Image (cartoon, rainbow, N blue to C red):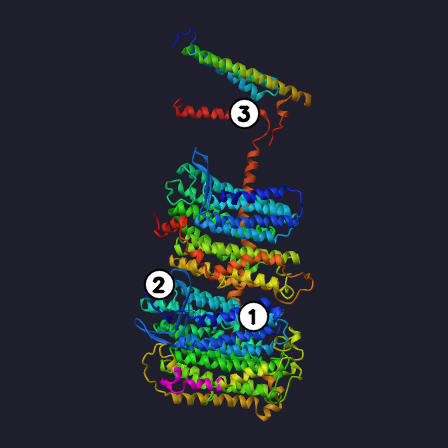
Amino acid sequence: MHYQMGNSGSYPLLLLLWLLPLAGAIVIWAFGPQLKRLAGALGSAVVGASFVATLLSWHDGTQSVAGAGANLVGAHQALVSWLPGFDFGLLLDPLSLLWVCIITGVGFLIHVYSIGYMYDDKAFARFFAFLNFFVFAMLTLVLSDNFVGLLVGWGLVGLASYFLIGFWFEKPSAVAAARKAFVINVAGDVGIMFAIFMIVASVHSIAFGDVFGNVGSLSTPWLLAICICLFIGAAAKSAQVPLHTWLPDAMEGPTPVSALIHAATMVTAGVYLVARCAPLWSQNADAQLLVGIIGGITALAGAILGCAQWDIKRILAYSTMSQIGYMIMGVGVGAYEGGVAHFFTHAFFKAQLFLGSGLIIHALANEQDVRRMGGLMKKLPFAFVAMLVGVLAICGIPGFSGSFSKDAVIYGTLQHGHPILYAIGILTAGLTAYYMFRLLFVTFFGSYRGDVDPSDLGIRHPELAGTAHAAHDDHHGEHHAPAWLMNVPVGILIVPSIFAGWLLFGGEHSPWAQFFAQQFPHPTLPTPAISELTTTLIVLACVAVGIGVAYARYATAAAQADAVERLRGESVRMPALLTNAFYFDAALDLLFVRTSQLFGTIFGRLIDPQIIDGAVRETAFSAQWLGTLVRSFQTGLVRAYAFVLVIGVACFLVYYAVISGGLH
Amino acid sequence: MLVLSLVLVPIVAGFVLLVLRNENPVMSRTVGALVAAFTFGAAIAAHGQEWSYRWLTRPFVASFHIGDTAISYWLVLLLAICTFCAILAASVPRQRAFVGQMLLLEGAMMGLFLARDLLLFALFWDLMLLPVFFVLLGWGEHVATAWRYFIYNFAGGLFLLLATAAFGALYGSTDVIGRSDVHLAGAWVPWIFWGFAVAFLVKTPVWPLHTWMPLTYSDTPSPMVAVVSAVQSKGGLYGFIAIGMAFMPEYVKAYAPILIVLGVISLLYGAFVAVTQNDAKRVVAYSSLSHLGLIVVALASLNATALQGALIYMIAHGLFSAALFLVLGFVESREETRSLVRLGGIGATNPRLAGALCIAALAALGLPGLAGFVGELIILTGIFQAGLTWAAILALIPIVLASAYMLRLFQGIMNGPQVPDLPVRRDLGWLEGLALAPLVLALVVLGVNPHALTTFDTGAYNAVATTLQGGTR
Amino acid sequence: MLPMSVPLIDYVALSSVIFFIGVAGVLVRRNPLIVLMSIELMFNAANLLFMAFARAWGNNAGHIFAFLVITVAAAEAAIGLAIVVTVFRTARHVDVDDVSLMKG
């Protein structure tokens, strides 16, 4: 019954890399005012140390020892126990190792970047406390060896995300966005909770090992129900349709937060969950199909909506949603290595894109609307290079990291027998190329439009369109932080953005495949009709079309000459369906928010005071009425009393006379 | 004798404070806190002790018999902590008399949880209403609330007393709490069961007997309501376990569907109403209705896991609702309003106060890592195991709603732009921080490792669990 | 049963007549003195029955009860007259129907 994952033992380094960020968060939170600027250095150092500890734990995480039945891969450290069956521990195996590397590695770079980005913020220390707390929570999520521990991490990253989205809490829009993100994520948590109930009821344990070891004993509908409930959590966290509406709003947070939490790590937790539960999903084709379809829809929807955005961070947010759709589609259909690889490369290039956009936003005093940018290539050459590499990588230009992983996902869908998802993947790749190059051309080409009146660009509500943020005034001041603090992390990220994908080179013998050899199930698959090389070529053709359209619309000399007029025209003519993001927000609002408020109002304003208290009042009134009735007999007249007495006695007499038979 | 002092010391100290002439608020707060701290230490030291004095032999045996049981031990500790924190946080006019009433309340509730005799239990049940009633009369906002509180709960107490008398007449002794060999049977038992049940359902409260609660919770001064919502509401649940389940398990089982339906209605109803309330204390009051409804479902599901979760959640709810009411009291004393419409943006000037409210709200919405989550998860796992799938699914809705209304509460007070006409006051002081520290610490410790609460298996609790696992005897 | 010169049923009939005269007096008259006298009549009707049955059955308990009733009747008359005097002093006249202080 007790099935094990990882070699049990004592791994102090594992505990260290897990708890260091927590310690950092507590120290910075408690002593923030005293630490001042040191908070940033301390926060970064803690995450850096955690990254070093991760590298030192590499051997523990990849060790493979022959055990009972199967090889035990990775390291397992027992922690506390709540109840029999509720045992907690840490598990470091190749899958979690990969995530930990990204969380601490990319996390470290973003921490360093944040020192520069948040330099003038009055809540500098609080920012790093939250960021460190996020790293701890995310590590809890990926290192847990059981579903409840995963749920704990799941909830805590949601909390960290809440804090950081609502970091500028004087701003009502940020406050609302933070609450929305948290509530939708709790709805996801609830899905995982329900999966846990089913798991505990059937397996009597929450440990991954016990659950995966007993997967054969679960009936098919039961397994499907567990997978669906788990996926509700994954969909909420990873912004899958229809639970994605919080992600674009989450861009209210500072840009480094968007890079770390809402692009590189937290939003990929759903991918992690599905990949971690590969033994469950690979036993149930329906569950796989469902996840694959949702992933495909999300990839396509995100890409379409990405074409209709003007806020630079919202474009990236929708592209994140779309790319996570790819990952979910990949792990959903069973192409685990491909989906996870796309997480790996995406973490680098999307972090880079966000940090690059942060450079722009920072240089333009919090301007986020691309219509008010333009011609920034000369003004911000480094940001241009950074964004260019990111855009090339996300579009899947051969040689850049994104091409390897995206092709692996797209080809994987075909391999696992889903031609429609395959087509969606290719179409989305073309759309991705279009909107990313649109972003690049509008931002960096042509001439600067920041001094043009917003209404001439078709910006109807400047205060709502990511323009003219006045919430944190001190942020506008002269920038004092040394420029390298922001440029160096971006520069370092360029390297993996280009080369990370090369790990996948070599098919079954690639380092990547070797790394995950014992992690995922490897069913033998039929060779599809279209080869991998042909797929790559088709994708490239689509990408070329996308780039071509974007070039024709935004980068030709004619387009640049009357850019203001063209942008205004596009803004005005944008279909309402796209500006309202397919009305998902409105539908969720109507279905859940309004309904709850209606119930609450009915219960609180009508049932409580009118019906329940009304019933209580009625009881009191009845008692009063009864009293009044009885009171009327109390006349105070002696003769009346005597009369009643006589009548009463007479009644008794008659009664006894009748029952004794005296009268007939 | 030490166990006797748990009841007597707070009561005597309370009366002494009431008759004293010295109006020094620091003195009365110090005395109150010291007494509460003493009861905490004494409760640990007196764990397992008993003290008994025979009262009656006819018409049934009754004793002044006190001593903790496995469950009441934790509730006594919770009571001592909450009273300690509430007295430290108390800053009201006529402080001396108020602290005196707080100590009387503590003494009466100590008696309730330590009573090993049903008659004594019923006596303390009515006794613990009086301090709250007097505080509502003396410090509350509306006299009608005091009467509503008293009449509702005293009516419940009357049922309890009748049921106790019937129990004594039927069984011959009321000196039974904590014994595992007592079992009632016969035609009268359903009446006795419902007599107890009505009292417990009013006290908890459960829909539709709850309408005294939002008014009481919003009108009572915060330190007192912290103790009332944290501990007094557990009196009914404790009675349900220690009396209903221990002596009449078949009837709990027979009437479980009614209790489960009432519990599920409570937990949905409370959550939906809490979403729309604008009075901060009423949000918490209705959230209490929701959370305690979950415990009622857990108890009625007759599942050992759910019961274990219920115990954890009782303690957790005590801790976080006390913390919430205390923090809301701090906010109210500073800004002189509780309206979420009027409040806003005070987190910018009071970051420590915002942090305190945030932690309390997060514990209340069941954030993983804090004690509330452990209780919720284990309860729901147990409910699901017991086969009540629909109840488990419905019980998930309030979890989502809780995140909505608790964040609305927190953000409505602390976040957003600063409101110009609200006074800017000093941030959380060290004494107020000290008042919250034990509650927060306990929430974190129990949230990370509830081992102490989940592994004990002694005495009456064991008997209850065994009974339930076996279904009926 | 002892021999009796007058049959028992005659005593019962007489007693009933006296009793109902008393009842009628209480119900009809408004002068409290007359009412008190009517109550005395009912007592005495009861006493007559006690005596008759005591004699008939040779059981002296009836005599004892009759004495008890006479004593109680005397006490009752004393209290009743005292009330009548008090009412007279405050209201300057006495009528049973005018005294309704106990009206609820």
Residue B121: x %, y % from top left: 48, 42
Q: Amino acid type of disc 2? A: Ser
The answer to which of marks 2 and 1 sits earlier in the sequence is 1
Evaluate if marks 2 and 3 touch, with contact meaning CB atoms under 8 Å apart: no
Distance from disc 2 to disc 3, alpha carbons, whole Å, reads 78 Å
Residue that lies at the very extreme toward the bottom in this rendered image: A557
Mark in the foreground, 1 or 3? 1
Does A498 lie within the magenta span? yes
Q: Amino acid type of disc 1? A: Ala
Residue A486: x %, y % from top left: 58, 81
The answer to which of marks 2 and 3 sits earlier in the sequence is 2
Identify the residue position indicated by label 1 in the image: A129
Circles 1 and 3 on the same chain: yes
Magenta stretch bounds: A496-512
Identify the residue position indicated by label 2 in the image: A202
In which chain is the residue bearing label 2? A
